[in-house]
Amino acid sequence: MERIPNAAYTKELREEAVKLAMDQGLTIPEVGRRLSIPKSTISYWVREARKGNLSSVGSSKKALTTVEMELAQVKRELAQTKMERDFLRKAAAYFAKEPQSGTR
């Protein structure tokens, strides 16, 4: 997962992530994978929500522009595509090997 340095997340996204972790019983790493957000950020939001301070989180940061959000999404997709490509290369190399003598 490609992280955005000093990313600012919307209030709605923070609330949805906390809701997934607390109400729907998903683990924090699972929520992080689903939303492409670091698990440390999710756990911080959950801690703050339990204290009742979730609304004040991120109030000092400006929201990401649509271009920045689109760039982050494209970077995530590119990272996923690279992982898939590398897997396919390894699989192709494995299956392209000559069969061992004594096997079918």
Image (spheres, rainbow, N blue to C red):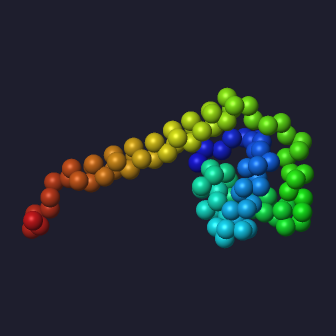
Residue in front for this viewpoint, 58 or 93 = 58
Residue at 60%, 56% (x, y): give it: 33
Q: Position of residue 21 (x, y in %)?
A: 70, 65
- When asked about the image quadrant of residue 30, the answer is bottom right
In this view, 44 is above or below 25: above
- Asked whether, in this view, residue 71 is left or right of residue 61, the answer is left
Residue at 79%, 37% (x, y): give it: 63
How many numbered markers are drawn?
Answer: 0
Toward the top, the furthest residue is: 67
Q: Position of residue 90 (x, y in %)?
A: 33, 50
Q: Position of residue 52 (x, y in %)?
A: 90, 63
Residue at 64%, 67% (x, y): give it: 26
Q: Position of residue 97 (x, y in %)?
A: 20, 53
Residue in front for this viewpoint, 8 or 101 = 8
- Asked whether, in this view, residue 51 is left or right of residue 7, the answer is right
Image quadrant occupied by the C terminus: bottom left
Residue at 62%, 33% (x, y): give it: 71
In this view, 21 is above or below 83: below
